[in-house]
Image: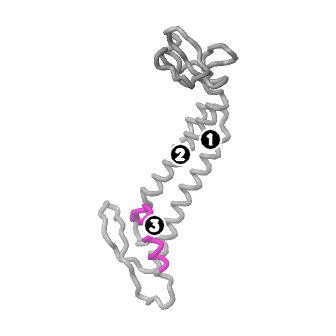
Amino acid sequence: MRYLTYNGNGPFTGAYIQDLLPEHEANHIEVDEATYLNWCDLSYQDGAIVPTPGPSAAQLLANAKASQTAIVSAACQQAIIAGFTSSALGAAHTYPAKPTDQQNLNASVVASILPGVAADWTTPFWCADGSGAWAYVPHTAAQIQQVGTDGKAAILACLTKNQQLAEQIDACTTVDAIRAIT
């Protein structure tokens, strides 16, 4: 003998053979072997065994929106930490933008604007030239401030794009339309 247990209407809560049915399981129903083997796909509804309904169209749409929004947000974070370019040194250089890099850039910009900074103040900062060679290159106060401005603009562009895509995703009415937004 095989049994399925339930707590009112809804999915079954367990499947047992006769000798293993716990005594405290008052709500149980005897079933045939095929039903017993497929119990995870079944529910108890008003005294009858019925297939468990799948998610509604609204639930599928909401799940797709949440999933695609998370994918777009992760891509935004990757774009931010991939770095940015600035021509503050006279030619395009690539700058890192992981969280520690952003903190270091902020500290350098702040140091460049403190009262009493010498006219010939410089700070070394990590960047890559056009050939991809990374090095600590001296930056003047004006140059490091420009790098800070360019970094902020690059990050803000990523965040703005992320928000625009999230709004597009939220406005979608089909799962296919949601998945098309990347």
In-image side of 5 versus 48 (left or right): left
Query: Which residue range is magenta in the image?
Result: 92-110
Residue 169, disc? 1
Q: Which residue matches tag 2?
A: 72
Q: Check disc 3: other Cα within 10 Å, few if <14, some if 14-19, many if 20+.
A: some
Identify which amino acid the numbered label 1 is placed on: Ile
- In terms of secondary structure, where does tag 2 sit? helix
Q: Tell me the distance, in whole angstroms, between the alpha carbons under discs 2 and 3.
A: 22 Å
| Residue 95 place in picture, x, y as percent | 40, 64
- Seen from the viewer's position, the closer of residues 30 and 135 is 30
Looking at the picture, tell me which residue is in the foreground, 48 or 98. 48
The local secondary structure at tag 1 comes to helix
User: How many residues crowd mark 1 within 10 Å: few (<14), some (14–19), many (20+)?
Assistant: many
Principal SS element in the magenta part? helix
Name the amino acid, label 3.
Gln
Q: How is the image coloured?
A: one colour
Foreground: 146 or 107? 107
Give the spatial CA distance, label 2 vs label 1: 10 Å
Amino acid carrying mark 2 in the image? Val
Are circles 1 and 3 on residues that touch, CB within 8 Å?
no
Specify the quadrant of the image occupied by residue 177. Answer: top right
**Label number found at residue 61:** none
Left or right: residue 79 compared with residue 169: left
Residue at image x 30%, y 69%?
135
- Give SS at disc 3: helix
114 drawn magenta: no
Whole-percent x and y of residue 56?
65, 27
